[in-house]
Amino acid sequence: MKQPAPGEQLQAFKAEFFKALAHPIRIRILEILVGGGRSVHELQEALGLDQPTVSQQLAVLRAKNIVEARKEGTGVRYAVRDASLREFLDAARRIFDNQLIGTQTMLRELRREARRR
């Protein structure tokens, strides 16, 4: 079996990272965790979700080394492994804002066009 080229391995690694982020709950968990560590219970309350759902999504993030778990007393606290994730999420938010601004501009133009008919 042919071994993947180093560039292909890197691209696959990047794709796996983005796949781990490809779920609305996981993104929301990360947005919360960049503000500081939280327990599953605290995440449940913040998200309005049940424990199995939150734990399942945390497991995906842990498997990709995006978050880490730290035993604290009888519980576990989760935190992002890399503080630069905050910058990454901020950059993504700016990109989304720019896309939405463009969409709003097109929507206004469509409304103007409809009124001219």
Image (cartoon, rainbow, N blue to C red):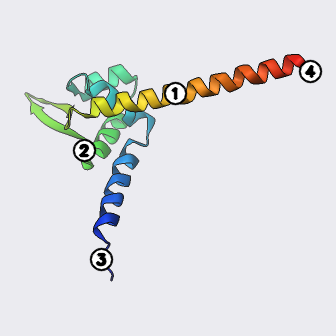
Q: Residue shown at 43%/28% (left/top)?
A: 93
- Depth check, mark 2 against mark 1: the one in front is 1
- Tell me the residue at 32%/64% (across/down): 7
95 vs 66, left or right, is right
Q: Nearer the viewer, mark 3 or mark 1?
A: 1
Label number found at residue 62: 2
What amino acid type is highlighted by mark number 2? Answer: Arg
**SS of the residue under disc 2:** helix
Q: In the image, which disc is placed on residue 57?
A: none
Give the distance between the C-alpha atoms of the residues marked 3 and 4, in whole angstroms: 61 Å
List the residue tagged with mark 4.
Answer: 117
Looking at the rendered structure, the kind of residue marked 4 is: Arg
**Residue 46 in sight:** yes
Residue 37 image position (x, y, % from top left): 20, 26
Query: Disc 2 versus disc 1: distance between alpha carbons?
Result: 31 Å
Element type at mark 3: loop
Q: Earlier in the sequence, mark 3 or mark 1?
A: 3
Q: Earlier along the polypeptide chain: callout 2 or callout 1?
A: 2
Estimate the spatial distance between the alpha carbons at disc 1 and disc 4, rounded to whole Å.
30 Å
**Residue topped by disc 3:** 3
Which image quadrant is residue 13 in? bottom left
